[in-house]
Image (tube, rainbow, N blue to C red):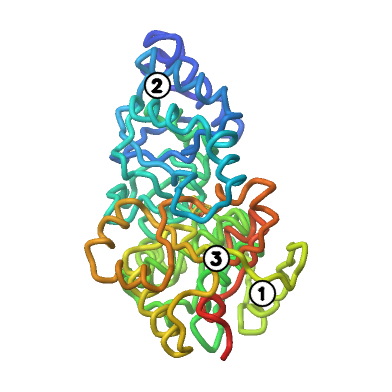
Amino acid sequence: MILTDEQQAILNGEKGETLAKVMETVVRYGELFGAQKLVPVTSKYNHLVTSFGLKMIGPVYDLMNELIEAGAVSKQQFSLDPRPVDKNVPANFLQNLIFNKIMYAKQDFYEGQLKQLGLMNEDAFTCACYMDEVGNKPQKGEVLSWAESSAVVYANSVLGARCNRNSGIIDIMGSVVGYVPYFGLLTDEGRKATWTVEIKTTKKPEAQLLGSAIGMKVMEAVPYVKGLDKWLGNELDDAACTYLKDFGAATASNGAVGLYHIDGLTPEAKELGEALIAENANVYVIDDAELQRVYDSYPVIWKNPNAKPKLCFMGCPHMTLEQLKTWTDRVESALAAKGNQKVAIPTVFTTAPAVIKEFNKTPYAERLKKTGVIVSYICPLMYMNNPLCGKMPVITSSNKLRTYTTARYYTDDEILDQITGGKK
Ligand code: F3S
């Protein structure tokens, strides 16, 4: 890798031993991917994936301490992924014990470190940091040092920013030293699509199911999706962005997509069109039958496949304000149609703390509360990733949660039907 004089000076320790180690980490990481230079991180804020004070990640706390003590703190403030625990989310005595005393016992300590390292504010814990209420929304062309896969794919695809799918900790390293290696999705070449996906469904595809199908097919490649603008329109309005948030998270977790282009809709596709498609790109056609095939292929890993669900999680990635409002209407209407007052399965909608504040200012908050649905800021994945919760029959419309846990995926309509009492 060829470094500038300034970068070389940092590597040589002229700005301290700690910053030299950070630079060495970033350089070595870049060399692994064949990067030949570093480029400046240009976004206003960073976003970190490591939001949880997990007891067993002692080396992370040591590392953070070393950064703090050496004053090797980023010029960027940052948001980060959701907090792992919320007392409003149903949990029994044993689960609470495991969460608070064993798994996430270091949460308060770690949040103290995060404040010293540049946490944006108390509400900045969400994977959907680009939502207006949160305020970490990069501009087109800005270079980022993020790692959260659902946020990276959104920033690249919907906002037109440039970021690789970094791993946790590398995200903070790039931000602290102010540079990231130039390779992959940072380059024009790396942003070209090697897959064309043709949507030929007879109705608007379920975002999380379509994302899953594409992710599993193209894996880490960049897909150029044609025919989706028929269903989403040609403007990135609130509805389209929300759809792409959920779609993207599924592509990134069911595969390893870091960038997609939607013909006639996302910024680079609007600007460059099919010039973004690489020569000899593969083709994947998605019709109703293909979506059904993908849906049917999901394994059910509950001990008893016929168990009654004990919990439902919606909002992975975190829900937008509009989603919360729409779902309030939907839950209310479905309950009324069945003559029911409250949801039949304990149900948690997850969203950003800043969105909860805004939601609570609207009449929808009281209405949703009356249905029995709980609104929380947690990450459902962190709730479920332990042997006790892993045994619970949990349902979700998140394909990311399905992939990483034992939760069972259903479409939005199926979830609505189940939580409001099933078929009458
Ligand atoms: Fe967000 Fe946690 Fe899902 S970080 S995307 S709510 S797994």
| Picture quarter with the C terminus | bottom right
**Tag 2's secondary structure?**
loop
Seen at 47% across and 37% down, the residue is 182
Task: Indicate whether 52 appears above or below 58.
Answer: below
What's the CA distance linking mark 3 and mark 1?
A: 18 Å
What's the CA distance linking mark 3 and mark 2?
A: 52 Å
Q: Quadrant of residue 282?
A: bottom right
- Outermost residue toward the right in this view: 303
Question: Would you name the residue on which mark 2 appears?
Answer: 4
Mark carried by residue 295: 1
Mark before the other along the chain sequence, 3 or 1: 1
Task: Indicate whether 417 appears above or below 175.
Answer: below
Q: Amino acid at mark 1?
A: Tyr
Q: Nearer the viewer, residue 187 or 135?
A: 135
Q: Amino acid at mark 2?
A: Thr
In the shown orientation, is residue 165 left or right of residue 238? right
Expressed as whole percent of the image width and height from the top left, the position of residue 66 reads 45, 15
**Tag 3's secondary structure?**
strand
Mark carried by residue 312: 3
In the shown orientation, is residue 148 left or right of residue 404? left
- Outermost residue toward the left in this view: 361
Q: Tag 1: Cα neighbours inside 10 Å, few (<14), some, or many (≥20)?
A: some
Q: Nearer the viewer, residue 233 or 34?
A: 233
